[in-house]
Amino acid sequence: MAPPVAIDPEWQRSWDGRASLETPWGVHSWSLRPWPHDPARPVLQVGLRRGGEAMRLAGRGRRDIKRLLQEVGIPPWQRDRLPLVWHGDELVAVLGALTAEGWRQTALPIPAAAQARFEDDG
């Protein structure tokens, strides 16, 4: 098994929330948008955990990300590779794991070519 790609803790990029997000360590097939739907698509910034981040969840208020990732069962060695999505100063999602109040995260279909590769490997 190949060692994981080294992570640059300063990695970040802009994202429109519509298309899959390509990162140095893989593709994240999720869309993210304000909810209820807002036709104006916000510009989102994606980066990595630095520690101390918190998110406002519907019905739960503000919670720290470390505890939330523990609650959803993400192992510690995977947490530093999860893209955090920001709208301005507000953390709105951890792709594939958590979504803030007022936002909706949806899995995107796997492209046919990627699906065929996956089926050939399995």
Image (spheres, rainbow, N blue to C red):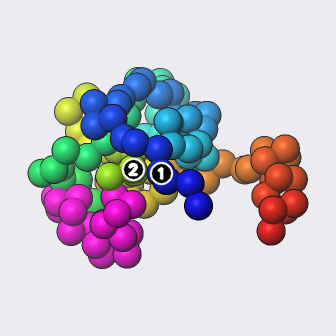
Q: Tag on residue 4?
A: 1
Q: Earlier in the sequence, mark 1 or mark 2?
A: 1
Dot 2 amino acid type:
Arg
Is residue 61 in the magenta section? yes
Residue at screen point 81% across, 62% down: 121
In the figure, 73 relative to 10: above or below?
A: below
Residue at screen point 12% across, 51% down: 52
Task: Specify whether residue 77 is in view.
Answer: yes
Residue 61 position by quadrant: bottom left
Q: Which residue is mark 2?
A: 81
Residue 120, percent from left and from top: 87, 60
Task: Specify whether residue 86 is in view.
Answer: no
What secondary structure is marked by label 2?
loop
Residue 60 position by quadrant: bottom left
Instruction: Identify which residue, 86 or 77, lies in the foreground.
Output: 77
Residue 122, percent from left and from top: 80, 68
User: Would residue 25 appear left or right of 119 to someone viewing this image?
Assistant: left
Q: Which residues are magenta?
A: 60-79
Q: Quick check: marks 1 and 2 in contact, CB under 8 Å?
A: yes
User: Would residue 122 appear left or right of 104 to someone viewing this image?
Assistant: right
Q: Residues within 10 Å of mark 1 (few under 14, many from 20)?
A: few
Inter-mark Cα distance, 1 to 2: 10 Å
Residue 118, percent from left and from top: 79, 58
Name the image quarter holding the N terminus: bottom right
Residue at screen point 56% across, 35% down: 22
